[in-house]
Image: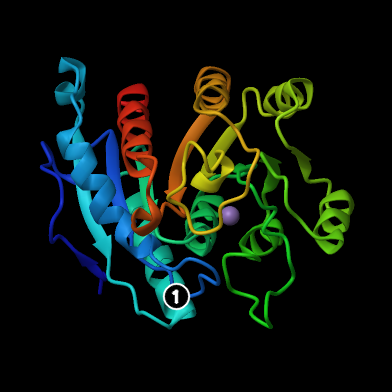
Amino acid sequence: MLHLNKNLVLESNCQLEEAEVALLGVPFDSTSSYRVGSRNAPLEIRRELFELEKEESFFEIPFCDLGNVDIVPGNTLETLRRVEETVDWIYRENPGVFVITLGGEHTITHPIVKSFSSNIKGLDVLNLDAHMDLKNDYLGEKWCHASVMRRISELNVGLSEIGVRSFLEEERKHAEKSKIAYCIKEKKKMEGILGKLEGKKVYLTLDFDVLSPEIASGVSNPEPNGLSLDELYFIFNTLIQKSIVVGMDVVEVNPLYDKTSTTIAAAKFVLDAVVKKG
Ligand SMILES: [Mn+2]
C-alpha cells in the first residue's frame, strides 16, 4: 500500500504515466537538531510556486504533482521505508520521469538515492550543502540529517560535495579515504568536480543551507559565507548541460525562519528545474 496523500497539491495536467516532471513532498523533520520546521517546506514552496509568474512553456510541460509521502513523525526508519517504496513505485510507473522531491530534512535523500541506484548503474550523487553530513552518527543516531551522506557513501554510488564549509576531522578523513571530492566555492575546484561528472548520470541533492544565510536565512542549520544564487545557478546550469541529471531534491528549507524570501528562492529554483527538464 502506498503512503501518499494529495491534500493541497498543485494542479497536474497529466497522470504520472505521461509526466515528464513530477513533484513529491516529504514533510519530515524529526531528527532536526537545531531549528525544527522544514516539515513546512513542501506546502510553503508549493504556495510560492503557485504565485510565481510562469512562462508559457511551463504550461506545455507534462507535469504531475504526486502529493506528499505520509511520514511518521518520530519514526525515521518507517518514514524512510515509505519514501523508498514511493520512489520505487514512481520508477515502475514511469522510468523516464524527472522527479523533484521537496524536503523536509536532508535524511530523506537516502531512500531516494537507494531506489535510484538500484535501477541506474554507475550513479553519481552531487551534494550541494554547507555541511558534509558524513558523521558516522550524531548524538548516537546513525539515521539523521548529519549522517545522511555517510549512509549514502555506503551505497554503490559516487559522491561529490560542493559548498561544504563546516565539518569535523572525522568527516574530512572519511571523505579522503572514500575519495569523496569536496570544495567550498573555489572556482577551479568547483569546475574540477563538475568536469568529472560530465556525461555521467547524476542525482542532485540541494541542501538550501549551501547558500549564504544573508541570501537564504530560512534553513535549519545556517552557516555563514556560503554560495551566492549566481554560483548555485552556475553549478545547476553546468550540470544540466554537461551531465545527465536523473533526479533532484531541495531539502532543509525552513519557512519558520525565513526572513530573506528563502522559500521563494527555493520555489523559483524548482520552477526553473521543471522548465529545464520538461
Ligand atoms: Mn545537509
**Neighbour tally class for label 1: few under 14, some 14-19, many 20 plus, Cα within 10 Å:** many
The C terminus sits in image quarter? top left
In what quadrant does ligand 1 lie? bottom right
Rendered image quadrant of residue 128: top right
- What is the x, y in percent for residue 5? 18, 65
Toward the viewer: 224 or 211?
Answer: 224
The N terminus sits in image quarter? bottom left
Along the horizontal axis of the image, is 15 left or right of 200? left
Figure check: 28 above or below 74: above
- Colour scheme used in the picture? rainbow
- What is the x, y in percent for residue 106? 51, 59
Along the horizontal axis of the image, is 94 left or right of 10? right
The residue at 65%/76% (across/down) is 142
Figure check: 136 above or below 109: below
Label 1 sits on what residue type? Ser
- What is the x, y in percent for residue 17? 21, 43
Along the horizontal axis of the image, is 269 left or right of 208? left
Toward the viewer: 245 or 212?
Answer: 212
The residue at 15%/60% (across/down) is 6
For label 1, the residue is: 30
